[in-house]
């Protein structure tokens, strides 16, 4: 996997019928990276099938799967702000460790940016734990600008700022 070949990987929006694939990868992400997300594995593992389906079929958002050939290796999503219809939050990016550091996060960003542009959104917001340097680097690569930070109690018992960025489209 030293060289990224575009034909080896693809990203696409999940269909409702694929909600179990999304669920499995989301729970894997929460289990493997407990300090990087806003919810916990325990909390989301209690979700009903209806709740998982609602996430995948949300008309105000999109969940994407990242694939190596036919194998699901990552997820990401974007959700339009309920109070500001011209803004959206980019959330829950996760790539399995075996596939990290080879440039695949660009595909996660590009899918969400294309989705936002098709809906004529004006502003995207993204945030990460201060120690998540990979997320910071990706944000800046795509032109996101720092806006503010808030100290947060993370689910891994750490206390660390959440850093917020915006991208005006």
Image: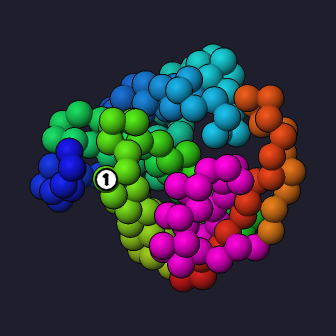
User: Is residue 120 placed above or below 70 in the rendered structure?
Assistant: below
Q: Which residue lies most toward the front here? A: 2
Q: Which residue is mark 1?
A: 102
In magenta, the rendered stretch is: 123-147
Residue 57 can be seen, yes or no: no
Judged left or right of residue 128, residue 54 is: left
Nearer to the camera, 11 or 100:
100
Q: Is residue 68 magenta?
A: no
The residue at the point 48 percent across, 74 percent down is 142
Image quadrant where residue 144 sits: bottom right
Which of the image's four quarters has the N terminus? top left
Say whether residue 132 is magenta: yes
Residue 48: image location, x then y, percent: 57, 20
Q: Residue at point 59% right, 62% down?
A: 136
Give whichever of 108, 118 is nearer the camera: 108
Query: How far from the left and from the top, in percent, is residue 113?
Result: 45, 69
131 vs 128, nearest the viewer:
131
Q: How many discs appear? A: 1
């Amino acid at each position: 996997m030293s060289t990224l070949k575009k034909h080896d990987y693809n990203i696409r929006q999940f269909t409702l019928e694929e909600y179990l694939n999304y669920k499995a990868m989301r729970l894997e992400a929460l289990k493997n990276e407990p300090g990087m997300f806003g919810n916990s594995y325990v909390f989301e593992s209690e979700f009903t099938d209806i709740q998982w389906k609602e996430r995948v079929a949300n008309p105000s958002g999109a969940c994407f799967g990242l694939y190596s050939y036919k194998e699901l290796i990552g997820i990401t999503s974007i959700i339009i702000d309920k109070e500001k219809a011209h803004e959206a939050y980019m959330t829950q990016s996760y790539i399995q460790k075996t596939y990290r550091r080879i440039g695949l996060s660009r595909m996660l960003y590009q899918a969400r940016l294309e989705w936002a542009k098709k809906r004529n959104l004006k502003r995207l917001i993204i945030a990460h734990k201060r120690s998540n340097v990979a997320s910071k680097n990706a944000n800046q690569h795509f032109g996101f600008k720092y806006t503010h930070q808030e100290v947060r109690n993370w689910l891994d018992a750490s206390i660390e700022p959440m850093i917020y960025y915006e991208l005006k489209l």
